[in-house]
Each structure stands twice: as structure tokens, then as C-alpha cells.
């Protein structure tokens, strides 16, 4: 039997989660069922400070703290968590930290990954913060060009117009967005590309990602969950009528979906990289035969897969976490 662990969960305010859809909540329920102790904190309550000198007289070291609560969770609408009084948590004294706050993947997110590196390897951070920082979902995927649809990442408007001229029907995405926010389909006869570029670059210094539109998205955008590089389950997300985006945040309909031979081929190609980088819980997006994103920041889909397949992937995730802590 695995030893009982102290687990700190870095997430958005727990009172805002949808207990019937949130993957972090499912992970917390599973951890609690195994006897692990849980704490909850938000990124805004983290603090990195100089610690006391070591008794041996060695140099002073940085220590990472967060103000948060010990917490118990339950699948009860309106009463899904119970907080103990606020306390200061020494994150370096935890066995595991789950980094589960939602994007945007901005400088605040990046700073949190730098802070979490200070508690490694004594504390297992899931997913590895350095790998998360170096592998934002729309960039990590570019290391596997043979699996992707034609893709462009750029600030250059002439490069964008050339890409559109070549592929005609395209998808335009903010590089560090999430949940389908700011994603546009630009059809061949659409006259709004120029205005869209002006609006984006007036508000942001970040590049855009463009991909050829894949008509297979009408049949769904498949989310596949990999645990330590191994494919474990999937759910298909079908766009609503009149909508190019399949994200469930914007009305996508989840449905049961088996893993195809092509899905397994994609997973086999990327799995070793994910495992080597300490990315234990990953969700990839596949449209037709193409890999479009590798989600490593705060992947979702556990509860949807459980509803369709009665497969609870939080179990193998915790099996793997426990094995890594034990090792």
C-alpha cells in the first residue's frame, strides 16, 4: 500500500468549480479516497522568501510558501468543500503539488512555474513546472510537424496573408489562449482578416497561430488523455451548429469516442517526449488525422470520459504519482 501523502492543490477558487465537469475536483476526490491529506491555495497567495540558515552553516536557501486551507471535498451541490482555517503552507514540506490553475499562460503563470522549481525534487510537482513553462500547448505540438495540419506562428502580417492565400480556409488562434476564446475561422470569402489582425496586434504583443481549417472538425475534436505518455481514454467534442469551435466552454457537445489506429499512432510518437519531460497528465487534441494541440497546463476531460466509458482516469494518474513519490 502506498504511503499517505500531503498534497497541495494550486488551482482557481474552489467555490467556482463545476463538480460535474472539473478534472481537478475529480483528482481531489480520488486523492482523498486514498487517504491523502489535501490543501488548497491560489497562485496569488504564493510567496518565495529566504529561509533560515542551515544548522551546518551552509548558505541560506529560498523557501516557497502559500496561504491556504486544508480542505475536504465531497460531491455535493452547493457544499462540495470544507475549509479548515487559513494557514501558511510550506510547499517544500508537501509530498505533491498539483499545478492546476487555468490559463491564460501569461507572465503570472510563468512566474509561478519558476517559483515551484525551488521545491523540486523534494516535492513532486505535477506537471513538472519547467516542462510546462517550456511546452505551452500550441508550441510543443510544433515539434511533431509530421502529425500536424499546415501551421504558421508569426507576428508578420504578410506571412499571415501568404498562408491564407495558400490554404484559403484557415483557423486563427491567440497563441496563449484557452477554452476556445479568440479562435476564428476565416473562410476564403471572409473580408475580416485585416480588421482581426489590427484588433489583435493593437491589444497584444504575442504572435498568432494559424492552421489550415480541417473539415473533419464537424465530426468532432477528440480530446485524448495520456498518463505518463500512455493513452488512457478519449472523448469527442462536436461543435454546435454554426460554430467552428468544439470546446465545451463554448457549447461543444461531448460524445463517446474510441481510440483509432491513427490516434494510437500519434500517441506512440509523442508519448516518450511527454514521459521524459515529467508531463504526467496531458490532454491532446486530434481533428481527423491531425494533432492540433498538446495541453499540459491544466488538462480537462476526466469526468466526461468517466460518464461515457465508466473509466476513471484519475485512478491511473494517482497510481503514477504515488509510484513517482515512492521512487
Image: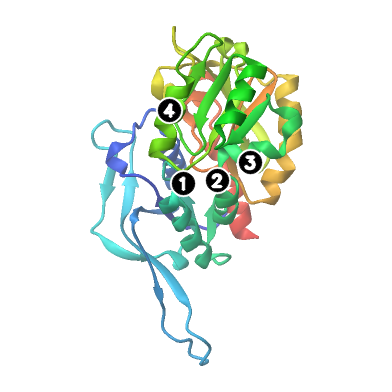
- Kindly check if marks 1 and 2 are in contact, taking CB atoms under 8 A apart as contact: yes
Which residue is painted at 43% across and 64% down in the image? 91
Give the CA separation, mark 3 to mark 2: 24 Å
Give the residue pinned by disc 3.
140
Residue 182 is tagged as 4
**The quarter of the displayed image where residue 93 is located:** bottom left
Residue 295 is at least partly visible in this image: no
Camera-near label (3 vs 1) is 3
Give the residue pinned by disc 2.
318
Give the CA separation, mark 4 to mark 3: 20 Å
Kindly state the secondary structure of the residue where label 3 is placed: helix
Residue 14 is at least partly visible in this image: yes
Q: Position of residue 283 (x, y in %)?
A: 57, 34
**The quarter of the displayed image where residue 228 is located:** top right
Give the CA separation, mark 2 to mark 4: 34 Å
Q: Position of residue 314 (x, y in %)?
A: 52, 38
Give the CA separation, mark 4 to mark 1: 35 Å
Amino acid at each position: 500500500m502506498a504511503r499517505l501523502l500531503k498534497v497541495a492543490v494550486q488551482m482557481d477558487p474552489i467555490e467556482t468549480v463545476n463538480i460535474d465537469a472539473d478534472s481537478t475536483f475529480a483528482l481531489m476526490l480520488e486523492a482523498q479516497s486514498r487517504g491523502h491529506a489535501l490543501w488548497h491555495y491560489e497562485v496569488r497567495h504564493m510567496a518565495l522568501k529566504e529561509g533560515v540558515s542551515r544548522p551546518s552553516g551552509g548558505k541560506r536557501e529560498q523557501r516557497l510558501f502559500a496561504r491556504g486551507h486544508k480542505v475536504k471535498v465531497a460531491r455535493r451541490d452547493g457544499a462540495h468543500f470544507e475549509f479548515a482555517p487559513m494557514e501558511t503552507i510550506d510547499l517544500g514540506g508537501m509530498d505533491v503539488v498539483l499545478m492546476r490553475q487555468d490559463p491564460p499562460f501569461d507572465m503570472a503563470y510563468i512566474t509561478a512555474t519558476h517559483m515551484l522549481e525551488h521545491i523540486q525534487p523534494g516535492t513532486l510537482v505535477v506537471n513538472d513546472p519547467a516542462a510546462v513553462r517550456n511546452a505551452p500547448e500550441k508550441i510543443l505540438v510544433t515539434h511533431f510537424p509530421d502529425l500536424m495540419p499546415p501551421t504558421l506562428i508569426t507576428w508578420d502580417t504578410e506571412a499571415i496573408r501568404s498562408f491564407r492565400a495558400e490554404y484559403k480556409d484557415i483557423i486563427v488562434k491567440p497563441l496563449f489562449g484557452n477554452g476556445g476564446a479568440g479562435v476564428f475561422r476565416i473562410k476564403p470569402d471572409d473580408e475580416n482578416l485585416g480588421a482581426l489582425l489590427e484588433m489583435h496586434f493593437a491589444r497584444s504583443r504575442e504572435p498568432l497561430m494559424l492552421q489550415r481549417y480541417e473539415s473533419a472538425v464537424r465530426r468532432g475534436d477528440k480530446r485524448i488523455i495520456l498518463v505518463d505518455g500512455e493513452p488512457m481514454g478519449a472523448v469527442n467534442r462536436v461543435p454546435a451548429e454554426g460554430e467552428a469551435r468544439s470546446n465545451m466552454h463554448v457549447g461543444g457537445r461531448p460524445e463517446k469516442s474510441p481510440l483509432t489506429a491513427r490516434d494510437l499512432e500519434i500517441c506512440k510518437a509523442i508519448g516518450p517526449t511527454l514521459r521524459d519531460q515529467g508531463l504526467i497528465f496531458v490532454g491532446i487534441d486530434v481533428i481527423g488525422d491531425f494533432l492540433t494541440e498538446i495541453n499540459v497546463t491544466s488538462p480537462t476531460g476526466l469526468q466526461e470520459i468517466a460518464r461515457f466509458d465508466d473509466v476513471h482516469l484519475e485512478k491511473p494518474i494517482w497510481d503514477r504519482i504515488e509510484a513517482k513519490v515512492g521512487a
